[in-house]
Image (cartoon, rainbow, N blue to C red):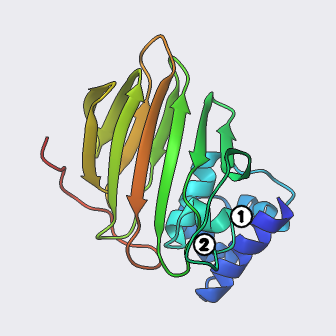
Amino acid sequence: MGELGQRIRGERQARGLSIERLAELSGISRSMVSEVERGTKTPTVLVLDRLATALGTSIARLLDEPAHSAMRVLRHTEQRVLRDPSGWERRVLSPVLGDVEFEFMRTTIGPGVDAGEFSPHAPGSREYLAVEHGSLRLTINGRPYELAAGDSAYYPGDCRHAYANDGTTDCVFYLAMEVSGVGQHEPRRESPDA
């Protein structure tokens, strides 16, 4: 947690943001931001996502240093796994690469679990999702889409997006995310077409 806190502090300082401003941009309390930076509080996945989004970066970049070689193998035991107390986990499958803001993840959501709503990323961001197992309720700007195993979706990352499993078995899906821009932004106003 100390290493994560140092990375968050470094990203915040590199952007010239105060703790108060990062709290305002992320919607996370100033005390929580301070505790996470000091390594005394473990953030949930949603809190970490909100901090990363406010900083214009990805969760993966907050968890790891950029890879320095052209080829990188991430063994299963080396992949970062974030477990949320509500009953879901996100496994980061992609390495952090220099100035590239890309994240490839495998998410498992338990039956009946709502993973919550994620904040819009910077304008121009994109997300690609594919359901491997189970069913997923993907909600984009308040509009729900029911996805089953084998279904896939694309949506702009600069809108509100939420994931829930209304089924009776685990839902497993893959998500590839390209984050554009740096820092906070205005959320996308319109809903994407179905």
- Element marked by disc 1: helix
Indicate the quadrant containing the N terminus: top left, top right, bottom left or bottom right.
bottom right
Please, which residue is most extreme toward the top here? 168
The x, y position of residue 77, in whole percent, is: 74, 46
The x, y position of residue 180, in whole percent, is: 37, 73
Query: Residue 127, relative to residue 139: is it above or below?
Result: below
Q: Which residue is mark 1?
A: 33
Q: Is residue 63 left or right of residue 184?
A: right
- Regarding residue 114, the answer to whether it shows in the image is yes
Q: Is residue 181 left or right of residue 95?
A: left
Which image quarter: residue 181? bottom left
Residues tagged 2 and 1 counted as in contact (Cβ below 8 A):
yes
The x, y position of residue 63, in whole percent, is: 68, 62
Identify the residue at horizontal 52%, vertical 38% (top origin): 107
Q: Amino acid at mark 1?
A: Val
Local crowd at mark 2 within 10 Å, few (<14), some, or many (≥20)? many
The x, y position of residue 46, in whole percent, is: 57, 48
Q: Which residue is mark 2?
A: 22
Identify the residue at horizontal 34%, vertical 54% (top origin): 127
Distance, label 2 to label 1, CA atoms, is 8 Å
Which image quarter: residue 60? bottom right
